Image (cartoon, helix red, strand yellow):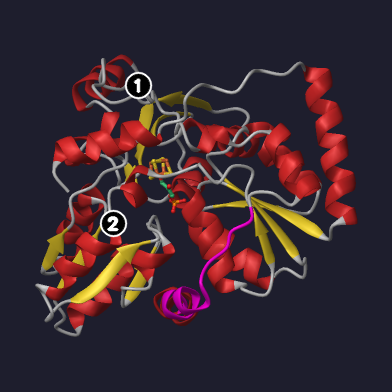
Amino acid sequence: MENQEFNRKIKKHLPAKAPEKLSDKENRLLADEIKQLLKQKNAVIIAHYYTDPMIQKLAEETGGFIGDSLEMARFGAEHAAKTLLVAGVRFMGESAKILSPEKTVLMPDLAAECSLDLGCEPEEFKKFCAANPDRVVVVYANTSAEIKALADWTVTSSIAVDVVKHLAGEGKKIIWAPDRYLGDYIQRRTGADMLLWNACCIVHVEFDADKIKSLKAANPDAELLVHPESQPEVIALADVTGSTSQLLQASKTRPAKKFIVATESGIFYKMQQACPEKTFIIAPTKAPSELYQCEGNCPWMKMNNLQNLRDALKNRSGEIRLAPEIIEKALLPLSRMLEFRKKHS
Ligand code: 13P
Ligand code: SF4
């Protein structure tokens, strides 16, 4: 997708305004109501690390789950609850539905998009794949169910390098979509022959290498943790590059007491909880942005709040519905990843 067209599409889908802030008392009342509803409806909360800390806390208190996009999908499939309440962005709800078609999957707001998903349209992608029929199609989990239905493999950032290394070892050439920076990172790590789609994450693309260098110079004791959706010059400065769960793990196991973190700031909840004695600083971003000033906050992740979480449960709104033939086709590349993970972990 051309940059201008990509920007136009992103702008159209950005949330119109930030949700109004509620008082502590209102949030406490909402949390209590959600706890009751979860029991009544035999439901469980599955939240991504990037969601509001109040949602993550509620997931923990109610036997739900907080994790990266791979772990979220697995948890939903393995849990006994009949209803999965997915706090994250739409592709995460869709992955849960693909793996658990018999369950009701609800999302607080179905308009919670992802710029990578938006940047990869099925019709265009079909043409791209048809023009390169000799290549295995590997897509990032941050894609719609329709895109997954066109793929041979679906991967998340926690497993992408291992899967591509394995495919390259079998002599396979690869189509990668949609994140060009993650694709470039995987390509450099594996040496695989990869054709890259051209979309990016509007949050990670903003991290600024020069400003990070200055911040590191001012904090020589700090280590830099980077999600591989960031640009190569930021990745080049990293002490650790990895998926959200890998970065969280690094924050626990590395001896450093201070970290500069180039990923979405929601992850600070779990980092700070695991390491209360350590300091976490969000990596500085480019300013001003021609698109949207994220400053380490995903505008779509932040659309999830206690109010719409309650409403989804109460009214059974925000239900993920997918055509059975899409589920059937999209299940194949997702199951391959889960099988691969089982075999290689
Ligand atoms: P993870 O798969 O690492 O959780 O990342 C998902 C995501 O949206 C990153 O921006
Ligand atoms: Fe998508 Fe980026 Fe938001 Fe992750 S942080 S959900 S990749 S827009």
Residue 292, compared with residue 115, is above or below; it is above
Q: Is residue 320 magenta?
A: yes
Q: Quadrant location of residue 25?
A: top right
Image quadrant in which you'd find residue 337:
bottom left
Whether residue 244 appears in magenta in the rendering, the answer is no
What element does badge 2 sit on? Answer: loop
Q: Amino acid at mark 1?
A: Gln
Q: Which residue is mark 1?
A: 293
Q: Residue 343: horizontal and vertical position, in percent? A: 46, 82
- Depth check, mark 1 against mark 2: the one in front is 2
Q: Which residue is mark 2?
A: 121
Q: Residue at x 16, y 80 (%)?
A: 172
Which region shows up in magenta?
319-331
Task: Say if 167 sits above or below 290 in the image.
Answer: below
> Residue at (27%, 78%) from the top-left corner?
166
Residue 223's spot in the image, x, y percent?
36, 33
Identify which amino acid the numbered label 2 is placed on: Glu
Q: Secondary structure at mark 1?
A: loop
Majority SS type along the magenta span: helix
